[in-house]
Image (spheres, rainbow, N blue to C red):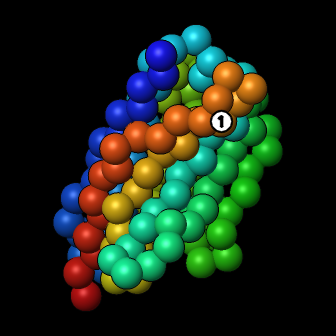
Amino acid sequence: QVQLVESGGGLVQAGGSLKLSCAASGRFFSISLMGWYRQAPGKQRELVAQISSGGGSTYYANSVKGRFTISRDNVKNTVYLQMNSLKPEDTAVYYCRQYSAAGEYWGQGTQVTVSS
């Protein structure tokens, strides 16, 4: 059974930084594609960033490119999202997703609020 637990969210002023973490249990982390998604009130959930199983390939939404960095530690079974130069429009619940041949799993989400 895979369990994902996000942490690191909070309230920050515009221009500030936060680092989100997603700790995964289970056997499949190192072979899984990992992604960070976000959902703002009244909007659809969107992909923010994604990283391949070995960490060699990443993807970023245009809205966060140059400000956010996704990384992973396959020893600690953890994926990170470093968020810099935060904007009020980054306010959302951020979710971690794990995907592999073993299935798809989501965390419970962590709230990020950016004040202007």
Coordinates of residue 84 in the picture (x, y in percent):
45, 65
Q: Would residue 52 be seen by someone viewing this image from the given angle?
A: yes
Towards the viewer: 40 or 59? 40
Q: Is residue 44 above or below residue 34?
A: below
Name which quarter of the figure residue 63 lies in: bottom right
Q: Secondary structure at mark 1?
A: strand
Q: Is residue 10 left or right of residue 103?
A: left
Q: Would residue 32 be seen by someone viewing this image from the given angle?
A: no
Q: Is residue 74 left or right of residue 88?
A: right
Coordinates of residue 17 in the picture (x, y in percent):
36, 63
Name which quarter of the figure residue 39 lies in: bottom left
Circle 1 sits on which residue? Answer: 99
Q: Quadrant of the C terminus?
A: bottom left
Write the residue at 40% across / 57% down.
94
Give amino acid for label 1: Tyr
Coordinates of residue 30 in the picture (x, y in percent):
66, 21
Coordinates of residue 28 in the picture (x, y in percent):
63, 18
Q: Is residue 21 above or below residue 36?
A: above
Write the residue at 26% across / 70% down.
113
Write the residue at 44% across / 51% down.
95
